[in-house]
Structures are given as C-alpha cells and as structure tokens.
C-alpha cells in the first residue's frame, strides 16, 4: 500500500495532471520515466477534474501537499484566478499549463511556449525572426504558439479559426503585445485564405484536425510550397498534413517534440533537476506504440 504523508521525511512527491478528460494523456509515462531516472520517490497521476470542481481541486494541492500539476483542456485559462502568482508569459498568454506548489504558494507557468520554440528550432531549424507564419486554429495551443512567435520577432502572423471571434480575439491581444508584427485574422473559408500561405514560411496546425485517421489535411492540395516548413501540433499520429509535406520534401514535424519539451520544462520547474530529455522522449514514443506524431 502507498502511504503518503506530508510530514514524513521519506515522503513521496506527487505530481499530476488536471484535465477533463485526461485518459488520452501521455504525460504520466513521460514524467514517471524522468522520476525513475533520478531514483526519486515521486509519482505522476492523472486527475479527472470536472470544470465545476476546479477550485476545490486547486485547493487540494495545498491541503494534500501535492507538489505540482500540469493543467490541460478545459482548465488552462480558468485556473489562473485560483493561483497566488503567475509568470509574465502565462499572464500575457492567458493560460497556465504548469502549477508549482511552493510551500503552499501556488505558482502558475506556461511551458507550451518554450516547448513549441524548442521543437521549432531543434526539429525544423526554423528561426521566426522577420518571417511570416500562418496559424490554423486560435484555441489554447494557438495562443501559446502565436505569443512565442511574436516574442521571437515574427514579421507577420495570420490566424484563422472556424470560430471567427477566437481568431479576432487572439489577433487583438497579439497586436497589443508588439505593434511592429503584422497580425491578421482571416475568416475560415474566405476566398484567398490559402493564397496567404504562399507568402508564408511556416505553417502551424493548432487545430485537432488530424487526430483521427479519417481527418483530411486541413490545407487543400496545391498550397504547400517549397519554402514552407510545417509544424503540426497533433502528436498522436502522422497526420495527412505531415504526410503531404513529407511527400513534397518539406521540412515538417508533428507535435511530439513540443509535448516533450513542455514536459521537460515542467519537470525542471518542479524538481529543480535537469530533465532527462532522451529518457522522457523514449517513454513518450513507447506509449504511442511506435507511432510518430
Ligand atoms: P482548442 O482549444 O479546441 O482549439 C482548436 C481551435 O481550432 C478551435 O477553435 C476549433 O474550433 C478550431 N478548429 C478546429 N478545426 C479547424 C479547422 N479545420 N480549421 C480552422 N479551425 C479549426 O484546442 P487546443 O487545446 O488549442 O489544441 C489544438 C491541437 O493542438 C490539439 O490537437 C491538441 O492535441 C494539440 N496540442 C498539442 C500540444 C503539444 O504539446 N504538441 C500542446 C497543446 C495542444 P471548434 O472549437 O469549433 O472545433
């Protein structure tokens, strides 16, 4: 039996994920592999937290002495009001994906930005400085991606989402952040939308389109061009978008690298130890059953 005590000197550190649902998550094997590498008495658990229970779940971090959690859909934005402090990035993005319990003070961070930028550099060798980027989707993930790109000096960011007001809201907040980045929201399905890709050097799919094998590529044929790099945030499979990009010989990557590096950053915030990235990557790939995202 597991005996978990706040006071015991050989206590088990508890980390986890708050989300709804959480069953699909790959974070537990990834973090548990990291803890095992350091022979830490620590465990990462999945907590299914319904929206109406979020406040009580956050309070329980203090009450039970849980050391830290990741936060995912649908809580990334709503959780902010229950925290004692949030990092500047997380505040600007309006989303927290990592909470550190620092002696009862709950600190909120966003590590998705870091994860995206690290994977962008490592897997695509892409520098956003003065480049034009086309982002599909304006939800939580797109917000982190867009802020990271603005911060890294992108010249132009085009955002489109089937929910038009989401794209407009994101673009407005980006414009406040850096006036010299041209940020444009374009209505999904509008004429000329995909032509905008022709002057872009990076395409980011930040929609769930591609998660199912039956999902078509979100970009119609003929708009992927040789100067375009493609980053698909979907990580559970090789999407049709990535397959098309590879057939054309374009630089492309799925979302596994971003998932890995957002997790690595969270691991470091919690444990103050260097994340064993190769071990964590292996655990992720193993839990995907060999499929590459
Ligand atoms: P989200 O909050 O639901 O946002 C996605 C947005 O895209 C929604 O507004 C959605 O509209 C819209 N959309 C769906 N299909 C579209 C299409 N074909 N064209 C334009 N817009 C479309 O989701 P999220 O949390 O941002 O996540 C998006 C994807 O990123 C998911 O696949 C998620 O697994 C992935 N992700 C990956 C990582 C990583 O580390 N690799 C991290 C975070 C998220 P509706 O709401 O009407 O569908």
Image (cartoon, helix red, strand yellow):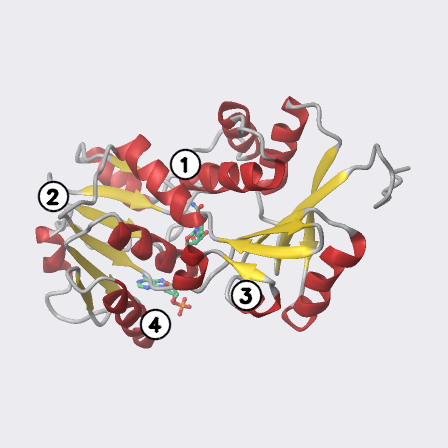
Disc 2 packing (10 Å; few <14; some 14–19; many ≥20): some
Alpha-carbon span between mark 4 and mark 3: 19 Å
Disc 1 packing (10 Å; few <14; some 14–19; many ≥20): many
Out of 246 and 92, give the one closest to the viewer: 92
221 shown above or below 261: below
Q: Residue at the spot x=26%, y=69% of the render?
A: 176
Q: Which quadrant of the structure image shows residue 64?
A: bottom right
Contact between marks 1 and 3 (CB within 8 A): the answer is no
Q: Residue at the spot x=36%, y=60% of the render?
A: 143
Q: Is mark 1 within 8 Å of ligand 1?
A: yes
Q: Which quadrant of the structure image shows residue 118?
A: top left
| Residue 115 placement (x, y as % from top left) | 41, 42
- State the mark number for residue 225: 2
Out of 172 and 272, give the one closest to the viewer: 272
Label located before the other in sequence (1 or 3): 3
Alpha-carbon span between mark 3 and mark 2: 40 Å
| Residue 123 placement (x, y as % from top left) | 31, 32
Label located before the other in sequence (2 or 4): 4
**Quarter holding the C terminus?**
top left
Alpha-carbon span between mark 2 and mark 4: 27 Å
**Quarter holding the N terminus?**
top right
| Residue 3 placement (x, y as % from top left) | 89, 40
Q: Is mark 4 within 8 Å of ligand 1?
A: yes
Answer left or right for 186 relative to 46. Answer: left
According to the image, label 1 marks what residue? 257
Tell me the mark number nearer the camera, choosing from 2 and 4.
4
């Amino acid at each position: 039996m597991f005996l978990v005590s706040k006071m015991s000197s050989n206590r088990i550190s508890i980390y986890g994920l708050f989300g709804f649902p959480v069953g699909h998550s790959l974070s537990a094997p990834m973090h548990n592999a990291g803890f095992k590498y350091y022979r830490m008495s620590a465990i990462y658990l999945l907590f299914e937290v319904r929206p109406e229970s979020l406040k009580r779940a956050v309070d329980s971090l203090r009450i039970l002495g849980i050391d830290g959690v990741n936060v995912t859909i649908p809580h990334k934005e709503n959780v902010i009001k229950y925290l004692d402090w949030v990092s500047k990035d997380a505040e600007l993005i309006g989303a927290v994906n990592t909470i550190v319990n620092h002696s009862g003070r709950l600190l909120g961070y966003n590590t998705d930005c870091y994860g995206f930028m690290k994977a962008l550099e490592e897997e695509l060798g892409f520098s956003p400085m003065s480049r034009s980027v086309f982002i599909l989707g304006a939800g939580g993930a797109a917000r982190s991606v867009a802020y990271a790109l603005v911060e890294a000096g992108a010249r132009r960011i085009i955002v489109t989402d089937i929910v038009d007001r989401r794209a407009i809201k994101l673009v407005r907040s980006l414009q406040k952040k850096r006036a010299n980045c041209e940020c444009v929201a374009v209505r999904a399905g509008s004429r000329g939308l995909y032509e905008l890709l022709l002057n872009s050097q990076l395409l980011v799919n930040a929609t769930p389109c591609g998660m199912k094998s039956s999902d078509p590529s979100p970009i119609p044929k003929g708009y992927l061009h040789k100067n375009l790099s493609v980053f698909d945030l979907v990580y559970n499979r090789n999407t049709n978008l990535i397959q098309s990009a590879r057939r054309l010989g374009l630089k492309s990557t799925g979302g596994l690298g971003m998932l890995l590096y957002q997790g690595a950053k969270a691991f470091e915030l919690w444990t103050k130890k260097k994340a064993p990235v190769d071990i964590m990557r292996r655990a992720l790939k193993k839990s995907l059953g060999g499929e590459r995202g």
